[in-house]
Image (cartoon, helix red, strand yellow):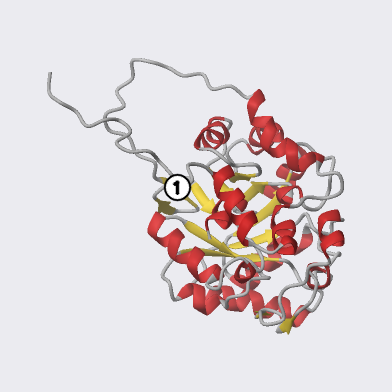
Amino acid sequence: MTDRPPLYPRRVSEPLNVFEYESLAAAKLSDGAYAFYAGGANDELTLRENVEAYRHWHLRPRVLRDVADVGTSVTILGREISLPVLVAPMAYQRAAHPDGEVAMAHAAREAGTIMCHSTFATATPAEVAATGVERWFQLYVPRDEGLKREFCVQARELGFSALVVTVDLPAVGRRERDLRSGWSVPPELIVPSVGLRGLKPREYVAMVSPSVTWDDVESLASAAGLPVVLKGILTAEDAVLACEHGAAGIVVSNHGARQLDGVAATIDVLPEVVDAVAGRTEVLFDGGIRRGTDVVKALALGASAVLAGRAPLWGL
């Protein structure tokens, strides 16, 4: 028998999983910033269920299959990426790390995946574009019509390959952690899309239109000249409407449980959405992703790929 190196050649001291990275991030961030990133709406029931619901979905392993040569690449909206995990849109990343969205974009590029750039990013779309990462632009549809058109044109001209329209924010969620901490985006950080500094997250989100309807989907696609992905679908009924109104893709998402407490964990509603879509549009998924097995379960239930938010953020 030939000698083989030990499976674990040394004692591991660095973080091994997302939960350990979160603990390190909590120690480094201010209490208010950590509360903003980690918190959910009201009693945080859905926040916990997003993570815990995976326990009720069990893997069914098949054996005696040739797995000597496997791959993780997938094709999403016609673009091949190296793994079925995209970086979800997240606001104010420079409050977590000085390089914020730019560092996140470099990491996504190295991983060979797509980064979603938030409307409320603290880096400009041009800065993110300069990294060479494959990128989608996430849009909170603003109240101001001129600003809405500007976002759409900017997304196209700066080489974003899709427009991700968040549809589950008609009103600002009540996050008690934020209310207790009183955290504001640090005044030294500017949110380029709106050109303002030092506001509380609720004040930024108050700029979002509460009047967006299904009729806006096709007009946004036309204005941007890009495929539109609707983020925030939780029911079969809305999945069908998304298909009927020309969405190129949907994201099964409850906004990281940050907006409406008491809705179902996303993994629990994924099967009904996949069945309703019946292959007519791309189905992506987010919510509670903490392990590779969580990704596998979402893919097995019909998602084309998943979006991860908090997990990569703790890595900053």
Q: Position of residue 306 (x, y in %)?
A: 56, 45
Badge 1 density bin: few <14, some 14–19, many ≥20, Cα 10 Å:
few
Please give the name of the residue rendered at 56% of the width and 45% of the height, measured from the top-left corner.
Answer: 20
Amino acid type for the residue under numbered disc 1: Glu
Q: Find residue 215 and report its image quarter.
A: bottom right
Q: Is residue 280 above or below residue 131?
A: above
Q: Find residue 50 and report its image quarter.
A: top right
Q: Is residue 257 left or right of residue 43?
A: left
Query: Along the line of sight, which residue is nearer the eye, 84 or 39?
Result: 39
| Residue found at the far left of this picture | 2
Q: Position of residue 316 (x, y in %)?
A: 53, 61
Q: Position of residue 197 (x, y in %)?
A: 73, 82
Please give the name of the residue rendered at 66% of the width and 44% of the height, measured from the top-left corner.
Answer: 287
Q: Is residue 14 left or right of residue 282?
A: left
Q: Is residue 99 left or right of residue 144?
A: left
Q: Position of residue 179 (x, y in %)?
A: 87, 61
Residue named by callout 1: 14
Q: Is residue 76 above or below residue 227?
A: above
Query: Along the line of sight, which residue is nearer the eye, 45 or 184?
Result: 184
Please give the name of the residue rendered at 41% of the width and 52% of the height, measured from the top-left corner.
Answer: 81
Q: Find residue 219 and report its image quarter.
A: bottom right
- Quadrant housing the N terminus: top left
Q: Is residue 310 above or below residue 129?
A: above
